Amino acid sequence: MSDPKLDDPKLKDKKAMRLEIKIDDAIAAGTYANLCIVNHSDAEFVLDYVFVQPARRKSKVAGRIIMSPKNAKRMMMVLQKQIQAYEKRFGELEITPMPHMDTSKLEIN
């Protein structure tokens, strides 16, 4: 039995679309972050990625991603799927509680 959604010609065209994505060498190398600060408005989510070094009181935002609320939710869903696949392959990730951080005192300038 076929899925009626897949029989929709508009959806078939979208499924057949091919997207080519290019990436600069500097971006492909990646940037390490161990903290993500998330803020939002009604129109967008802002994710600031930071590398906090031990015993240092100052850090710098290494990257900022701004996205729509719908795309933020899509990202959350795909991350959940990827973490499930990771844990199925490598075992459950043990998460320790995050140290308390008073985000009202964070300054990003």
Image: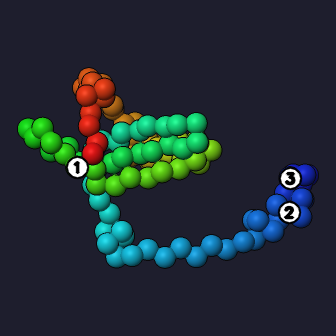
Residue at the location (67% across, 74% down)?
18
Q: Position of residue 22 (x, y in %)?
A: 49, 76
Render colour scheme? rainbow
Earlier sequence position, callout 3 versus callout 2: 3
Q: Residues within 10 Å of mark 1 (few under 14, many from 20)?
A: few
Tell whether 76 sits left or right of 35.
right
Is 106 placed above or below 97 here?
below
CA gap, disc 2 and disc 1? 45 Å
Q: Amino acid at mark 2?
A: Lys
- Of circles 3 and 1, which is in front? 1
Tell whether 10 sits left or right of 17.
right
Q: Amino acid at mark 1?
A: Lys
Residue at the location (85% across, 63% down)?
10
Residue at the location (81% across, 68% down)?
13
Q: Position of residue 101 (x, y in %)?
A: 26, 26
Circle 3 is placed at which residue position?
5
CA gap, disc 3 and disc 2? 9 Å
Circle 2 is placed at which residue position?
10
* Quadrant in which residue 12 is drawn: bottom right
